Amino acid sequence: AQTVTQSQPEMSVQEAETVTLSCTYDTSESDYYLFWYKQPPSRQMILVIRQEAYKQQNATENRFSVNFQKAAKSFSLKISDSQLGDAAMYFCAYNVYSGGGADGLTFGKGTHLIIQP
Amino acid sequence: DSGVTQTPKHLITATGQRVTLRCSPRSGDLSVYWYQQSLDQGLQFLIHYYNGEERAKGNILERFSAQQFPDLHSELNLSSLELGDSALYFCASSSTSGPLSIGNTIYFGEGSWLTVV
């Protein structure tokens, strides 16, 4: 079974600084998808960024970028110029397509990101 | 606003009871997914329906069942409720049942809070 591990239960960063959240996963598949979701106090699940495993280029979305290391099965999220609105739980997630239909996302336990003003 | 609508937003019920959670997917989306978020288990995938048919099953208990109707809305039925079933239940939708590539993003609803007392 696939597993996703987020080793940092909580991270704190000063406003305007850069922070990196770690994620590792375990899979025997070669083609899969990786995601970072943000869950603010409202509990809404918001997609931050996505990476297809077959793409070597790291995904970027404005201030958010990933460092995808396929051989190491590592998928970290870098947030640049941290803003107060970035404070939230961040979940790393994995998905594989089985052919019959998209399996569900497998989530890590989450990292609570605190932004210090 | 993701476009995924879940009702009710909050529900308190007693052990042994049965409840139904309802989900309306985004306009045009044919896939519906159910997830459970609890303190003990974190975020877990329960089940995936596509155009009325079950496509993938996760850690869904036998006491739980789901269906997707011809109008594409979905219901999650939880029966013989236990204290441990207290959780936030998310519905999510995507346009197809295929891989979760850029053209098939999963969008989450705001969730239904279930408290079993």
Image: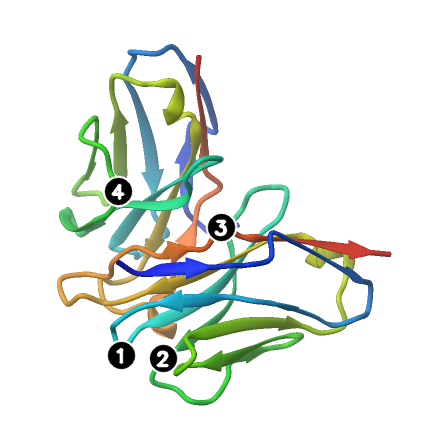
Q: Local crowd at mark 4 within 10 Å, few (<14), some, or many (≥20)?
A: few
Under mark 2, the amino acid is: Ala
Can you give x and y, in whole percent of width and height, for residue B38 in the image?
45, 35
Chain of the residue on which disc 3 is drawn? A
Under mark 1, the amino acid is: Ser
Q: What is the CA distance from the residue labelled 2 to the residue labelled 4?
A: 25 Å
- Residue for badge 1: A30
Assign the N terminus of chain A to one quadrant of the image: bottom left
Q: Local crowd at mark 1 within 10 Å, few (<14), some, or many (≥20)?
A: few
Q: Is residue B48 above or below residue A67?
A: above
- Residue for badge 3: A109
- Residue for badge 2: A53
Q: Label 3, secondary structure: give it.
A: loop
- Residue for badge 4: B59
Chain of the residue on which disc 1 is drawn? A
Can you give x and y, in whole percent of width and height, for residue B5 in the image?
42, 41
Chain of the residue on which disc 4 is drawn? B
Q: Which mark is residue B92?
A: none
Q: Residue at x 15, y 67 (%)?
A: A99
Q: What is the CA distance from the residue labelled 2 to the residue labelled 3?
A: 21 Å
Q: Earlier in the sequence, mark 2 or mark 3?
A: 2
Q: What is the CA distance from the residue labelled 3 to the residue labelled 4?
A: 16 Å
Under mark 4, the amino acid is: Asn
Q: Are marks 2 and 3 on the same chain?
A: yes
Whether residues under marks 2 and 1 lie with C-beta atoms below 8 angstroms apart, the answer is: yes
Q: Quadrant of residue A61?
A: bottom right
Q: Label 2, secondary structure: give it.
A: loop
